[in-house]
Image: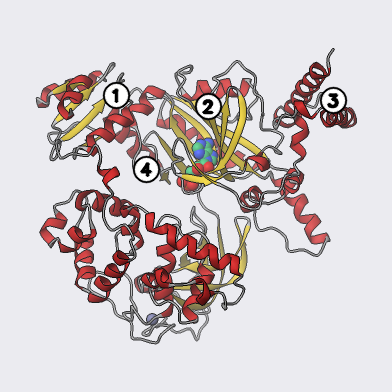
Amino acid sequence: MTVQEKIQQLREELHTHNHSYYVLDTPTISDYDFDIKLKELQQLEDENPEYFDPNSPTQRVGGEVTKNFDTVTHKNRMYSLDNSYSKEDLLDWEKRIQKILGTEDIEYTCELKYDGASINLTYENGQFVQAVTRGDGFQGDNVTTNIRTIKSIPLLPNSDFVTDFEMRGEIILPLEGFHRMNEERVANDEEPYRNPRNTASGSLKLQDSAEVAKRPLDCLLYQVVTTERKYASHFESLEAARKVGFKIPDTIALAKSIEEVLNFVKEWDVKRHTLPYETDGVVVKVNSYQQQDELGYTSKAPRWAIAYKFKAEQVSTILNEITYQVGRTGAITPVANLEPIQLAGTIVKRASLHNADQIAKLDVRIGDTVFVEKGGEIIPKIIAVDLTKRPADSVPTQYATHCPECHTELVRTEGDAKHYCPNEFGCAPQITGRIKHFISRKAMDIDGLGGETVDLLRKGGLIKNYADLYDLTVEQIIPLERMAEKSAQNMIEGIEKSKETPFEKVLFALGIRFVGETVAKKLAKYFKSIDNLLNADFETLVAVDEIGDRIAQSIIDFSNDLGNIDLINRLKSHGVQLEVSAESLEGQTDKLVGKVFVVSGVFHQMSRTELKKAIEDNGGKVSSSISKKTTYIVAGDNMGPSKLIKAESLGIPIISEQDFINMIA
Ligand code: AMP
Ligand code: ZN
């Protein structure tokens, strides 16, 4: 046997043992013998560096140190999931998808919702090549070296599978390992970790992969993404993935109806406490890939899946104080400061109270014993007061009348749930809040400038608004606390580079009230420049699809403020993108304006996504179900029969892929 063959043999053997131990939970070799073989392999690899392989079992111990994790764009977006909390929610969802699919014949898979950090594993030619965190769903961090140390993740899955694919799953920290880590920390006089989920996601961002290797992390997989059409359904592909070595929990099940889904939920709401890891719900998915394709996605989540959240845990504790926070738009949020208490694995000290009405509705008072619940959100909420425990001398809560930061009198306009501090340009948290929003990842994404630096810059009198950022010089910022020349340089470069940020993101960055990411995209596409947008009147604005009175009025208010116009002019003079670039206009026309399309079936010349993009690029609108408003149905192969009937009964023309291509040519 040649050295190369020997190395190969040892690697295969060790991969198999890893799989038996970490995935199947049935060790096939003693730890001692495993170590001997691993050492032998390590020595052969050291002596023969030409056979280095990043996927060798020897690489599982880590050692490589990553200072900064690269940002990677996901090939396929990692969506969120819509949530449901009751049987009615699930039945509503079923109705919606039955309507789109035009059939009642839908099979579901039920999986537990594993509570950890999402991960996307990329395999090429059957080999593990990259692992990226979910990030914002479009881009995440490249944590490949750290992920390689998790031994239940196969680096070379068995070849009887698709060859190029992404595996999606959850990095979790099983409870036993979590408690063990905490015992060790307590013994070393260190603060224990709060909960397994945060510890798991924190572990992925450790710089030293050898540290990651020591943590008892695990990875549960729940989705195969591939263009190879080897499997027809989600369940089938998960079963196949399990056979080739991936850890797919055997709790997954098929359901023929929502009734069966509910049985699964009922069973696991109890049994989940016996699992070695935490779960916070059930994820229900339409099983057939063909039906999944038909259903597609909303701007946030697949239509073919829904999470069902288990009922949140509740505790009661004492409300010590109500304080008020000021957001970037001046909105005031009351915060309940609680007697710290353990809830769903974390220590809770604060809870959100939303607004004055909420406080009045709950009649919550200082000194009250309150019930606190933790749902999906990070900040728990107060759901009720335990009146039997109310102190005799308690007084009703008086809502704040003045801004806690700048002492300006608060205002509340008709119809607004929130109070606002009107001191827009003089109130510190509003000033920094707007700048922090401007530089954030989904907005201008300025590297080398963080929230704390913004505070320092403002305190130092260097910036009062986001346009001021573009006047900063290295010399001005070096004297700031903790600012080295290199970081000053990076910051200025980051600001310079942000001038290339596309208009739709700049528009979002401006922080116009109610203009979120999706609305900014819509407006950028429609108006194409800031001048067109700010010159538009109310009627023009509300005529834009999905722009309502509230958003339109907010844009008008923004454009009527000369301070804002001055900021925009300054951004313009610095070369920030305040109109859509020529490249992104390429291929865009108005040919389909006013037309509504429904896309159904399987296509050949374009993918379904490309087809939808082409409709939108040419000014048309894509809708998911057929109605009187539909102008055309673009039909591919295997269009659903009930859709066909519906289209015919409403007299809506059905066109082919080729007809459509001719239409936009
Ligand atoms: P959310 O973060 O609430 O939008 O829920 C979406 C997340 O649930 C995904 O990003 C996954 O990380 C996580 N998740 C956990 N278990 C599953 C599962 N079985 N199927 C899909 N997603 C899951
Ligand atoms: Zn204020």
Query: Mark 4 or 2 closer to N-term?
Result: 4
Q: Residue at x 89, y 27 (%)?
A: 33
Pointer 1: what residue? Answer: 103
* Quarter-of-image position of residue 505: bottom left
Give the mark toward the camera: 1 or 2: 2
The residues tagged by marks 1 and 3 sit, at their Cα atoms, a distance apart of 52 Å
Classify mark 1: helix, strand or loop: loop
Judged by depth in the image, the label closer to the viewer, 2 or 3, is 2
- Against 600, residue 198 (above or below) is below
- The spot of residue 161 in percent (x, y) is 57, 18
Rounded to the nearest whole Å, what is the CA distance between mark 1 and mark 2? 30 Å
- Dot placed on the residue nearer the N-terminal end, 2 or 3: 3
Residue bearing mark 3: 29
Q: Nearer the viewer, mark 4 or mark 2?
A: 2
- Looking at the picture, tell me which residue is in the foreground, 152 or 495: 495
Determine whether the beta carbon of the residue marked 2 sits less than 8 angstroms from the nearest atom of ligand 1. Answer: no
* The CB of the residue at mark 1 lies under 8 Å from ligand 1: no
| Residue 165 badge | 2
Considering only order in the chain, which callout, 4 or 3, is on the residue closer to the N terminus?
3
Q: What amino acid is labelled 3 in the image? A: Ile
Q: Nearer the viewer, mark 1 or mark 4?
A: 1
Of the 4 image quadrants, the one containing the C terminus is: top left
Q: Foreground: 52 or 380?
A: 52
The residue type indicated by label 2 comes to: Phe
Residue 90 appears at what percent x and percent y? Answer: 38, 39
Q: CA distance from mark 3 to mark 4?
A: 49 Å
Q: Position of residue 575 (x, y in %)?
A: 33, 61
Q: Which circle, 3 or 4, is nearer the viewer?
A: 3
Return the residue nearer the eye: 280 or 331: 331
Answer whether labels 4 and 2 touch (C-beta < 8 Å): no
Q: State which quarter of the image contains the N terminus.
A: top right
**Residues at marks 1 and 4 touching, judged by CB atoms closer than 8 Å:** no
